[in-house]
């Protein structure tokens, strides 16, 4: 099984360039924290209240407060006022479009965990509401093919710099 | 835009169950570390030698050694003896199938970073070697549809427990 992608053009060989603008690194700097990703999981599951995030992720209130503040600052969650009967107005949280676009990351992590770390089988299954079929995160090219790692070329993009990419 | 998935069956409402077997959490416990994920990025880019991992990820040798050891222990990388002319045999690293199956996670992180954190455009672009088209990580059901978050049902799977999932 070929597990590496093919470096092409000025990205070959690897020692010729520095991955100083790497989007994976930038994404991880914003959303690479375990508690933050589990808070986002809960937001996808419909959780919106502070206490529920802390309890359902299994983190202390100070940690939940810090992670929620970071997620709001980075624009992944937005604060949302709500009010229950007879109570004062409180702030809840909802996913922004920026946060919601992390769903493929969470689904890809879930299916990898299901495949390799869930001996009893997947505890939960995401299904397409319209047809009931299970949903996966998969790699596809714009022409609809599903390339394996060995069939991928890494090419310089418009954001590459002189010596980096 | 609907950003939450629909909890169904005994997973509704959310307070009825604990996500104690969550595959996302289990995946993050093994592969949720930024340095570890960037080491895996380098392994996909063809890096195999200890010194190159440390330099290309931009981490110290002790950190690289600790992360590589964890990745080998968890079965994501395997040690691979190699020998350069006139030198003693050394150990390199290659992705196992378990490690290689994390590629959709890295591609999903890359495209999110490209979309939200790369003002000059993507520094690198993955393309299908066969047709040259760019490759994305996308959500698809087994019938081939591409459901949005609001069209997803969360259902209990075979690994769900009495009160958890």
Image (cartoon, coloured by chain):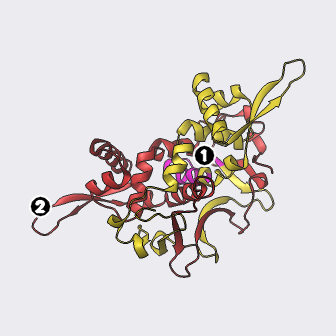
Chain colours: A red, B yellow
Disc 1: CA contacts within 10 A as few (<14), some (14-19) or many (>=20): some
Q: Residue at x 76, y 59 (%)?
A: B132
Indicate yes or no whether the magenta region holds residue B115: yes
Q: Residue at x 64, y 28 (%)?
A: B54
Up/down of A135 relative to A26, above or below = below
Report the magenta residues as a range: B107-124
Up/down of B101 relative to A87, above or below = above
Residue position marked by numbered label 2 in the rendering: A88
Tell me where residue A160 appears, x and y as whole percent.
63, 42
Measure how far apart labels 1 and 2 are at the Cα level. Answer: 48 Å
Tell me where residue A59 appears, x and y as whole percent.
34, 46
Residue position marked by numbered label 1 in the rendering: A159
Question: Which secondary structure is most common in the magenta stretch?
Answer: helix
Tell me where residue B4 appears, x and y as whole percent.
41, 67
Q: How many marks?
A: 2
Indicate yes or no whether the magenta region holds residue A73: no
Residue A112 makes an appearance in the image: yes
Up/down of A53 relative to B157, above or below = above
Sequence-wise first label, 1 or 2: 2
């Amino acid at each position: 099984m070929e597990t590496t992608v093919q470096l092409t053009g000025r990205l070959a060989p690897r020692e010729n360039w520095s991955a100083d603008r790497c989007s994976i690194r930038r994404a991880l700097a914003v959303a690479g924290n375990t508690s933050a990703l589990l808070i986002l999981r809960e937001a996808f599951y419909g959780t919106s209240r502070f206490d529920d995030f802390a309890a359902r992720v299994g983190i202390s209130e100070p940690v939940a407060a810090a992670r929620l503040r970071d997620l709001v600052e980075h624009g992944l969650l937005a604060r949302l006022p709500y009010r229950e009967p007879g109570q004062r107005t409180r702030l809840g949280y909802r996913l922004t479009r920026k946060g919601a676009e992390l769903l493929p990351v969470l689904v890809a992590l879930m299916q990898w965990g299901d495949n390799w770390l869930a001996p009893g089988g997947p505890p939960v299954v995401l299904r397409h509401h319209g047809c009931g079929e299970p949903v996966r995160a998969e790699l596809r090219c714009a022409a609809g093919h599903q390339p394996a790692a060995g069939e991928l070329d890494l090419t310089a993009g418009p954001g590459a710099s002189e010596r980096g990419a």
